Image: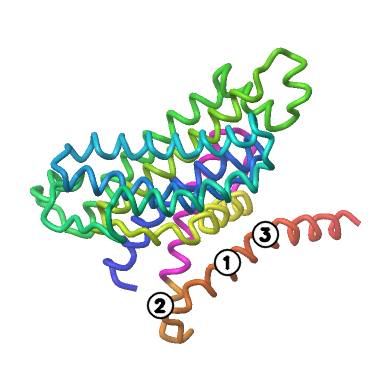
Amino acid sequence: MSAIAFFGAIESGLLFGLVAFGVFIAFRVLDFPDLTVDGSFPLGAAVAATLIVSGWNPWVATAMAMVAGCMAGALTAWLNVRLQIMNLLASILTMIALYSINLRIMGKPNVALLGDETVLTPWEELDIAFYLISPILLTFVVLAVYFLLVRFMTSETGLAMRATGVNAKMARANGVHTGRLTIMGVALANGLVGLSGALFAQTQGTADVTMGVGTIVVGLAAVIGGEAIMSTRTIARWLFACLIGAILYRLAIAVALNTDALGLQAQDLNLITAVLVTLAIVMPRMKKLKRSGGAA
């Protein structure tokens, strides 16, 4: 595998690490199955790309993309909390609606950013290999988000949110506003996904209305895979495991596609994804069976 392919996989892993953080908050912290991710990812890309083409500062456009993602997540949670629509169905409804909204925002199926200023533009003037620019910048962004999330999840509000996901009835009995925290948590999760979409559009030079297809699967693969290979005793380790899972997932795909002996091609990406997710789900069970067999 070439250096360009390797660092390209690292770049994708860091981008989807943000998605993994969002999926972690929804699925693990709040126990809220959320498919809005497949819509909020292209939403972030659409908002950022449209604003950048309109002359906005790329960092401001990226922040607005994150806000848009938060709004999408808040809508999903509001449908569930206030209108009592099942969480999975509420997320599907929002995801479907976002397809049309994304088309409205962009005014067409895709928006190109070639020649426009992005968050990467100042870095391109430095004496750095082009394939290292995105991974370096994304490392700073992802680590900043990681430390902020760790601090938030260990705060009073974060602990209340985690209690909501573990036992909502008990949390309400202790005076926790579970509805508000659910809306806040799902909004935060999709805000991170929107941020990932905005950065993805700028690193790839385009935003497309279909780019979110399968995002939730990648996020789940990162979360489950990270949990299978790392300890999750603390929230810091758990979040770090999600990030490592995302990077290893993209590296595994890159190795599979760049290994001639396997004979895999780009159109086999979904097949590789399905196999990797299956392995990530089965591995923890196999470990448990092995331990129990050894104990017996």
| First to last magenta residue range | 230-254
Q: Quadrant of the C terminus?
A: bottom right
User: Residue at the location (78% across, 22% down)?
Assistant: 170
Q: Is residue 245 magenta?
A: yes
Looking at the picture, the colour scheme in use is: rainbow
Task: Please tell me how crowded label 2 is: few (under 14), some (14-19), or many (20+) other residues with Cα within 10 Å.
Answer: few
**Is 186 placed above or below 129 here?**
above
In the displayed structure, would residue 172 be above or below residue 290? above
Task: Please report whichever mark, 1 or 2, sits nearer to the chain's N-terminal start.
Answer: 2
Q: Quick one: SS at disc 3? A: helix
Dot 1 crowding, Cα within 10 Å, few <14, some 14–19, many 20+: some
The residue to which callout 3 is attached is: 281
**Which label was assigned to residue 266?**
2
Percent x, y of residue 246: 48, 54
Q: Quadrant of residue 12?
A: bottom left
- Residue 295 as seen in the image, left or right of residue 227: right
Mark 3 crowd level (few <14, some 14–19, many ≥20, 10 Å Cα): some
> x, y percentage for residue 262?
48, 84
Q: Which image quadrant for residue 113? A: bottom left
Residue found at x 58% / y 16%: 156
Q: Amino acid at mark 2?
A: Ala
